[in-house]
Amino acid sequence: MTWTTSRPLAVTPGEAAGIGVELAIAAWTRRNQRIPPFLLIDDPARVRRRADIIGAVLPIEAIDHPSKALAVFDRALPVLPHDFAAEDVPGAPDPANGPATIHAIERAVNMVRDGQASAIVTNPIQKEALYQAGFAHPGHTEFLAALSGPAVTPVMLLASPELRVVPVTIHIPLAEVPRHLTTEAIVTTGRITAAALIRDFGIAQPRLAVAGLNPHAGEGGALGHEDAEIIAPAVAALRADGLDVRGPLPADTMFHAEARRTYDVALGMYHDQVLVPIKTLDFWRGVNVTLGLPFVRTSPDHGTALALAGTGKARPDSLIAALRLAAEMAERRAATANAEIRG
Amino acid sequence: MTWTTSRPLAVTPGEAAGIGVELAIAAWTRRNQRIPPFLLIDDPARVRRRADIIGAVLPIEAIDHPSKALAVFDRALPVLPHDFAAEDVPGAPDPANGPATIHAIERAVNMVRDGQASAIVTNPIQKEALYQAGFAHPGHTEFLAALSGPAVTPVMLLASPELRVVPVTIHIPLAEVPRHLTTEAIVTTGRITAAALIRDFGIAQPRLAVAGLNPHAGEGGALGHEDAEIIAPAVAALRADGLDVRGPLPADTMFHAEARRTYDVALGMYHDQVLVPIKTLDFWRGVNVTLGLPFVRTSPDHGTALALAGTGKARPDSLIAALRLAAEMAERRAATANAEIRG
């Protein structure tokens, strides 16, 4: 896929003391490696400072409007100026920079809504450093959903070259998973996932594989009742929608190469059930995608890596994969929208 | 490793209607591919019948004592005669054959105890077909432990070329995992595992990686209390034993290639947490090993595959891996015992 877009991706800085800015620098220096044009929302002086710290030699150019990014991208890293309250110290988050970190995300959302950017790619944030600034969300995903309106149900999809997965429950204790799991949640997640695979991933008839909750998907009830009572009815409801859905399947035999060829996305019932296989197969190139938003948003599938900040050693693989996937999704979504307008 | 043993492995037939006998035939036909010598406890006429059904051409030789197996193995599949009550129909288990299936396992145990076999390799059984014959165990592992005496705690280890894993809880509903998990169970499992890696796997100072129960190993208590309250004390107790143990670790970042190089075995808290990564990485060559028994026992890491029985299409990869691993473990255990006697 080559990039036909007339708009840049909007990249947020994430935690100022983290590796986000270094990843953006590393991605831009590889711009000839099929990196879609992007702009970084950040303080140009700060970007220069961090580039110097990690020994990166690159031109940086402040732009006064997102529309300038594409023309600049070939010759310099386009930075849309954004002020931070305090000078950042790599590895040491400063709560004083919390408001600017949050505001950068809001700016990116506004940009994509106003048609100035094609999609959002967010660098990792450190939630603890944002709480003092009034951040009241479990994470990026929920914040972006809140910015998008009350009717939005965000769904987290993780994509790697080997596998796409969606956890139905995410950041809750394992003991709470069985009682949080509902047929309705699985159906809603499955519908949003299928719609996104059609619209944003170009898969006309997506195949969904739904994992069981218990060992061997409950082994006919001998190892738990949720597979038959909660998950099977959800699979039936999704099939009644006309979707290609199988399950509940024993999770342990779902993720080897032959099994993976039989579906386009695996729905798991809890965090580790799907995070384990995707990170086992490809630790570096996983991308976190939020489905169900009115815009395309991806992010690297890792944290702020404070211990690596300032070393230049953080691998940009995941950010690069997130940039490429965001651009692909945005172009497909635009093509679908155009086809609908023309049709 | 070449085989220095003077005793054969004892291979059980498993479910007579299943693929066990076909796997043994397939393994023998590849005997030049570093297959350790084994005998099959089975009815020679039945073995011949199944060989004909799947179109396998091979010499079969009935032996009247396990000691004859090694001399025979180069020229024919050595079969120690064992009577089944009914003629087997591939794919259709007959409860009439239950007693003989169970008795074959007992014969293998007696053989290895009497020094006539070096280790046991069991083919898969169909528990439902054995219940009428009075089989009262959840599976092979518990039956072998019961045959071994009251003080035996069996531990299931799964080994593949990529990874070794041990689940602390196994065949219970996911909802019951948190309340079944105890510090004592993790410590006992860790000790038995470490002892086996030293004695049977030749790893002088085994490195154990212990998974957390919750997402991100509980994220400091925000995502569950068991990691800090149940698992961390177990890790501390195992360290106090002088063992090289780390944890609780976030499960999703434990199984990629770089992470795997940092340990010799991963202890997981429940079935899918460790079965998912090992089967994702190598679906065909996983071996099930029972640690904590007074003898070496391995088995293929799959079921009876009734749908494949009689087709000759079942892949013998896992049985072959189980044969090799059993022989390696038995030779190491014998070498350790000899060293102790000499020392």
Image (spheres, coloured by chain):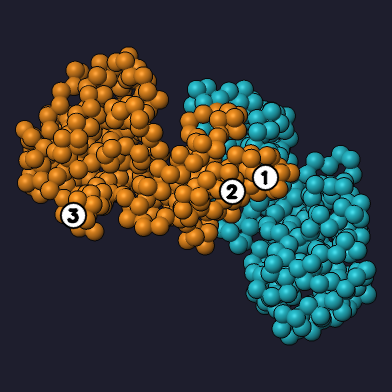
Chain colours: A orange, B cyan
Q: Is residue B84 visible?
A: yes
**Does B237 appear above or below B34?**
above
Q: Which mark is residue A248?
A: 2
x and y percent of residue B26 in the render? 70, 75
Residue placed under numbered mark 3 in the picture: A342
Amino acid, disc 2: Pro
Comparing B314 with B193, the one in front is B314
Residue placed under numbered mark 1 in the picture: A218
Chain of the residue under label 3? A
N-term mark: 3 or 2? 2
N-term mark: 2 or 1? 1
Disc 2 to disc 1: CB gap under 8 Å:
yes
Q: Is residue A257 visible?
A: no
Q: Quadrant of residue A293?
A: top left
**Does A74 appear above or below A47?**
below
x and y percent of residue A179 in the render? 59, 30
Observer-side mark, 3 or 2, equals 3
Regarding mark 2 in the picture, which secondary structure is present there?
strand
Screen quadrant of the N terminus of chain B? bottom right
Q: Is residue A255 left or right of residue B230?
A: left
